[in-house]
Image (cartoon, rainbow, N blue to C red):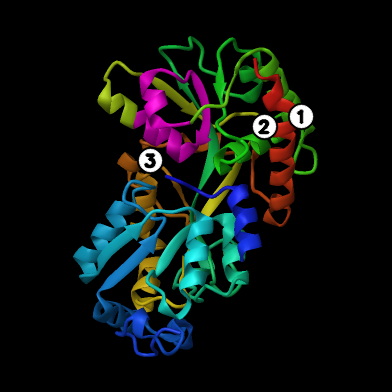
Amino acid sequence: MNRNTMKKAAAFVLALACTATLAACGSTASAAASAVDYNAMSLEELTAAAQEEGTVNSVGMPDTWANWVETWTELKDNYGIEHTDLDMSSAEEIAMFKEEGKNGTKDIGDVGQQWGPVAEEEGVTLKYKTSYWDEIPDWAKDDDGDWIVGYYGTIAIITNNNLVENAPTSFADLLEGDYKVTIGDVSAAAQSQHAILATAYAMGGDMDNLQPAYDFWSTLAQQGRLDVGETSVARIESGEIEVCLLWDYNALGYRDNAVSNNPNASFTVCIPSDGSVQSGYATIINNNAPNPAAACLAREYILSDEGQINLAKGYATPIRDVELPEEVQAMRIDASQYGDNVHSIDYDKWTDVCQDIITYWQENIIPTIQ
């Protein structure tokens, strides 16, 4: 899936209602969807309005990402709400909401956590807190419900056991290995940039001190052990990748996909014991959604026990503390690996930190790759 990058962030920043009746279309809009206070509705009223609309159109929420398919299927089975999706990056989602304005064609999107405040600042979000508001951590939501994190991931290590004898369980292990480590395109990929920050924490640094991470990756580059190729399931399946850094839900999904296609394949996935970072994805509801009630009901369902379990089936970590079925929990990395060494991110600092990572990578590490 094409996710957000800091280059797109810069481009977006530089580049930069509907009808009041619930059943009307965005193309004939005369007032913003936000003119209706959906928080004031009972769930029964919201559900009735959503069923009258009958459709929810998402962006960046395809069936194959974090098991969205089960949520869309259950919305249809339970409420008769049809679904369509157009896959795109976080920046593109916000840009579409803004550019379409009163003639909005999309209802809800899923964006990287750092993009939630951007969407709010651009004035494209409808406020809806859901009935689960009090169970959402403060770091995972806007004060008024302009964006709410539904799930999050943690940077993990995936190792091809047929290529590497002793699977690394820490960044320190990675440094001592004799295999190549795949990081992906740090200049463009958010996942890779978060992996650099995870390295900093593991090596004794933090958001204000990235040098330990730079030293780590410079060493691997000089040793000829740095792979900046694509971190794709195809490369993992083909045996091109020995060890790779990915979000845990991607690593687990890639592992299971590879094993399903090749029973002889074997992979180890773990959270690095000496440090990692976590980051979430947040839903944003279009302020000019053609189906605002259906979008609000979709967010409500995403944060329900059923919706959170669906995301867990896709290996993402639910934002609410829900009890997972044993068979779902068994699919995941043991909870004991997510300890005090897993750090949240201060997104007030992230834009500057990320630009520093990109600049240093391009100027100091790429030229030294052997």
Could you tell whether 95 is left or right of 213 in the image?
A: left
Residue 237 in magenta?
yes
Secondary structure category for the residue under label 1:
helix
- At 49% from the left and 48% from the top, the residue drawn is 3
In this figure, which residue is indicated by the disc labeled 3? 329
- Return the residue nearer the eye: 215 or 4: 4
Please report whichever mark, 3 or 1, sits nearer to the chain's N-terminal start: 1
Q: Amino acid at mark 2?
A: Thr
Residue 210 in magenta?
no
The answer to whether marks 1 and 2 mark residues whose Cβ atoms lie closer than 8 Å is yes
Compared to residue 347, the image places residue 190 above or below, namely above
Cα distance in 3D space between marks 3 and 1:
34 Å
Q: Position of residue 357 (x, y in %)?
A: 71, 39
- The numbered dot on residue 199 is 2
Q: Amino acid at mark 3?
A: Gln
Front: mark 3 or 2: 2
Q: Position of residue 59 (x, y in %)?
A: 40, 60
Q: Position of residue 318 (x, y in %)?
A: 45, 52
Compared to residue 13, the image places residue 218 above or below, namely above
Magenta residues span 231-256
- At 66% from the left and 18% from the top, the residue drawn is 220
Q: Amino acid at mark 1?
A: Pro
- Return the residue nearer the eye: 147 or 18: 18
Could you tell whether 277 is left or right of 63 in the image?
A: right
Image quadrant for the N terminus? top left
Compared to residue 89, the image places residue 104 above or below, namely below
- Return the residue nearer the eye: 203 or 118: 118
- The numbered dot on residue 212 is 1
- At 33% from the left and 46% from the top, the residue drawn is 64
Cα distance in 3D space between marks 1 and 2:
8 Å
